[in-house]
Amino acid sequence: MAGNSFGNIFKLTTFGESHGPAIGGVIDGCPAGLSINFEAINAEMKRRMPGQSAIVTQRKEADEVKFLSGIFEGITTGMPIGFLIENTDQKSKDYAHIKNIYRPSHADYTFDQKYGIRDYRGGGRSSARETACRVVAGAIAKQLLGNLKITAYVSSVGKMELGKHYSEIDFSEIEKNPVRCPDAAMASEMEDFIKDIRKKGDTVGGTVTCVIQNVPKGLGEPVFDKLHAELGKAMLSINAVKGFEYGSGFEGTKMKGSEHNDSFNIDGSTKTNHSGGIQGGISNGETIYFKVAFKPVATIMQKQETIDSKGNPAIAEGKGRHDPCVVPRAVPIVEAMAALVLADFWLLNKLSKL
């Protein structure tokens, strides 16, 4: 099975299944001499972990990270960093009823068609459980990037939109509510809506906005490896993501060139930032901002018509513990994937100057 690695220089390879004994990864390319803040890694893991509030899956996983290699006395050695996260709260019996049934909008059918075998327990390898490994690597990438700041937050749930520009956001408000929306009133409405959706056995999607500040100029390449293209690939690799836009995005199509162009100041900064901090595939030093769209979680607690592995009509109905809305827990995952992309390009720039 290909496609288990991400990155070129700062490279993450992950392994494991949702209901296996453990998941884990190997980070290759992290420079030697980086002092690792383990508390910061644990804090990132707690932001993603299940069971953190009433509006997410109630699976209870401590998500404690065990580092196996590449770090000695708290300092990276330059060798591959191996890590393990044990699965301790699997309830595989919750999935026995779908052993031979394809759940609508899941990876069940396509996985089976490609490999001829699938781990039906929680989705196996295609489960979002794998994203815990990305958060570990992203937390280390953040430390490598130093003063560069990556902040994500929930900007919409269903049809409820925050409707604020990132410059109007007080980032200190993000972690003050379980939705991770930086507006107390809107967050309360979103939370009530998600709870109501859960009671009905349904799910809802939303968007996560990410803002990257203190970005150095010159990250990214002008042709195939454009910075925004790699960020798009990173975000679209996250489970349940259906869309990505950066800078003015689709709204920019409604503007004229005279309105959209970012005029320069004498120091090279720009008067506006419709470009989203990236021009010609390369960072220009302005704030990078983008939005990621997440679909409603495919597992719903309602009966749905489907087929089984032999092509016969069947009924699928969700059981067990699932997120009614994935966006609150997706916030640290979006940040982690952005950090992996930026760390990769930052190291590439350093190598190109040797």
Image: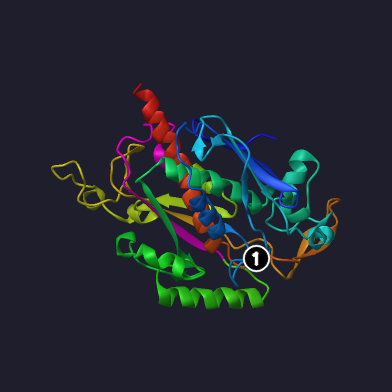
Name the residue beneath numbered marker 1.
57
Which residue lies at the image location 80% right of the left edge and 41% below the top edge?
116
Task: Give how far across and how far down residue 118 sits, in percent.
Answer: 78, 46
Task: Give how far across and how far down residue 332 sits, in percent.
Answer: 50, 55
Q: Is residue 230 visible?
A: no
Lateral position of residue 229 relative to residue 321, left or right: left
Residue 63, image quadrant: bottom right
Q: Residues within 10 Å of mark 1 (few under 14, many from 20)?
A: some
Task: Give how far across and how far down residue 252 sits, in percent.
Answer: 33, 53
Colour convention of the picture = rainbow
Give the magenta part as a residue range.
205-229
> Which one is in front, 72 or 199?
72
Residue 344, image quadrant: top left
Which residue lies at the image location 58% right of the left edge and 70% below the top edge?
53
Lateral position of residue 190 relative to residue 22, left or right: left
Q: Is residue 220 visible?
A: yes
Give the amino acid at mark 1: Thr
Is 187 included in the stretch rendered in magenta? no
Where the C terminus falls, by quadrant?
top left
Above or below residue 82? Residue 338 is: below
Q: Assign a secondary structure to mark 1.
A: loop
